[in-house]
Amino acid sequence: MSAPPLLVIAHGSRDPRHAATVHALTRRVAAARPGLRVDTAFLDLCAPSVPQAVGRLAADGVRDAVALPLLLTRAFHAKTDIPAVLRESAAALPRLRLRTADVLGPSPLLTAALERRLAEAGLRPGDRSSTGVVLASAGSTDPEAGAVIAEIAREWRHTGWCAVRPAFASASLPRTEDAVRALRAEGVRRIAVAPYVIAPGFLPDRIARGAREAGADLLAPVLGAAPEVVGLLLRRYDEALRPAARRLLSA
C-alpha cells in the first residue's frame, strides 16, 4: 500500500515570498521521503485553499491523508480555523479520511534550526556566551502560545547564551525593538534577533524592522526550508500515522 499523502496547511500571505518559501519547504519534504505525495494548501490569501486541495486529493482517488498545520504553536489557527475547515471539507467527501498531525512546536529541532539561521547570519560558536538573543515570534492572543514562546526562551538560555528574551510582532509585548533595547541597557555586548517564523510576510518584516531600528547586531533569516524543519514535518507526519498502525497490529 502507498503511504497516505501529506497535506501541509500554511497560513497564507499577500507577500509572494511567503508562498514561495512554503513551496520550497514542501518540495524538500517530498525529496526527503521518495514516494510520499506532498501537497500544499493555505488558510487564506493564497491558492490553493484547503477545500480545493482536499478536493483534489479526493478527485485523484486518495482515501487516506494526513493534514499537517504549518504552525509553530497551538494558537487560534491550530485550535479553531484548521479543524473547522478540515471538518467541512471532510463532510463533503465522506470517502476521504483526513488525519490531523500536531503543530511543529515546540521541538528541539526548531531550536537547532534557529541556531543554524543565526550561524548563517554570521554568529560564530565563540560568540555564544557574549550574545543575547531575542526570540521573535509572530505573536498570538492565545495565552498558551505566549507561554510556549517564553518557555522556549528560558530553556534556550541554558545552552550557553548570555541571555534569551521572547518578543512578539503582534498581540503581545514586548516588541522586538523593546527586547533589543532592554538587553542593550543591561550591558549585553552582542544582540542577535532570531525570527521564530516559517516564512516571510508582514509580521516577519515587522520583526526585521524592529531589529534594525533598535540596532541589533545580527538578524537571522526566517526558518524556511531548514533541514531541521524538513525533518520535523516528516516526524509529525509519522506520528499522525502511529495510532492507526497500532490498531492494525492489534486487530
Image (cartoon, grey):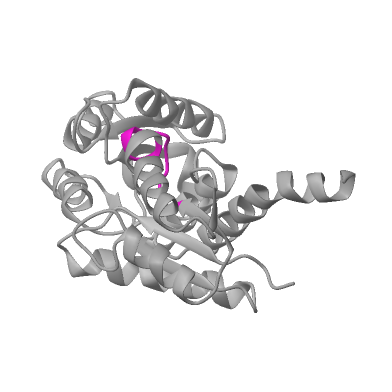
Left-right relation of 215 to 117: left
Whether residue 64 appears in this view of the structure is yes
- The percent coordinates of residue 245 (x first, y second) are 77, 51
Query: Residue visible at 16% across and 52% down?
Result: 202
Q: Nearer the viewer, residue 133 or 162?
A: 133
Type of secondary structure dominating the magenta stretch = loop
Image quarter (top left, top right, bottom left or bottom right) of the N terminus: bottom right
Q: Nearer the viewer, residue 234 or 146?
A: 234
- The percent coordinates of residue 103 (x first, y second) are 48, 43
Q: How many marks?
A: 0
Query: Residue visible at 27% across and 41% down?
Result: 138
- Determine the residue located farthest toward the right in the rendered image: 250
Query: Residue visible at 64% across and 72% down?
Result: 33
- The percent coordinates of residue 132 (x first, y second) are 37, 36
Q: Is residue 176 magenta?
A: no
Left-right relation of 225 to 44: right
Examine the rendered structure and indicate whether residue 75 appears above or below residue 111. above
- The percent coordinates of residue 58 (x first, y second) are 47, 68
Chain part drawn in magenta: 69-78
Q: Is residue 77 magenta?
A: yes
Left-right relation of 3 to 53: right
Whether residue 70 appears in this view of the structure is no
